[in-house]
Amino acid sequence: MTDDLEDHVRAAAGVAELLPGVRAVGELLCRTFAAGGTLWTFGNGGSAADAQHLTGEMIGRYRRERRPLPAVTLSTDPTVLTCIANDYVFADVFARQLQALARPGDVVAGFTTSGRSANVVEALRTARDRGATTVLFGGGDGGPAAAHADHLLLVPSTTTARIQELHTFLLHAVSEVVDRWAVGER
């Protein structure tokens, strides 16, 4: 456990360099919500849980009482996911939803620790093609997904557990920016 803690502390120290990018993503979401846009999130496994966590902070609240903000996690509907995976391919489960739903002015945030999840890569590419702004919550160099992201929040680690631990910090930091805006604190 000591090695894991030391690994976490090293990665967390490196996250300090991401704070300007975190603020930029938070401010992007503020502009998006002010203009009537939607945040779309997705990921696989633990990354799907992180995507749902961010959506929950937007619809619920982070620290302040405020209005709910439009956010949707694409991995929460098993009927749609299994329909697309069965009728097409699993790599299309998020992209096909974004083809139907995403529009210019929206923000699309993909979570993947490796950056190699084919369905996340394809969804980010599709979202960009649809005119949405894309955000990647990833790790290491972001893998192939980084090529399709307008904003990169990459935890400086290649260990899945460390990346997921710090994705929680990053999504909370983004939520803080949005919460402040939503109640007029700036």
Image: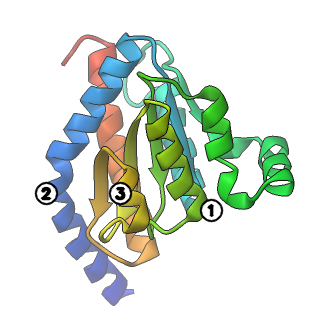
Q: Mark 3 points at which residue?
A: 147
Of 124 and 26, nearer the camera is 124
Look at 47% across and 33% down and name the residue there: 57
Residue 60: x %, y % from top left: 52, 26
Q: Mark 2 points at which residue?
A: 17
**Amino acid tagged 1:** Gly
CA distance for labels 1 and 3:
22 Å
Q: Quarter of the image holding residue 162?
A: bottom left
> How many neighbours does mark 1 have within 10 angstroms: few (below 14), some (14-19), or many (20 or more)?
few
Q: Is residue 82 above or below residue 35?
A: below
> How many neighbours does mark 3 have within 10 angstroms: few (below 14), some (14-19), or many (20 or more)?
some
Label number found at residue 45: 1
Please report contact status of discs 2 and 1: CB closer than 8 Å, yes or no: no
**Amino acid tagged 3:** Ala
**Residue that lies at the very extreme toward the front in this rendered image:** 129
> How many neighbours does mark 2 have within 10 angstroms: few (below 14), some (14-19), or many (20 or more)?
few
Q: In this view, does 48 lie to the left or right of 141?
A: right
CA distance for labels 2 and 3:
20 Å
Q: Which of marks 2 and 3 is nearer the N terminus?
A: 2
Q: In this view, does 41 lie to the left or right of 142?
A: right
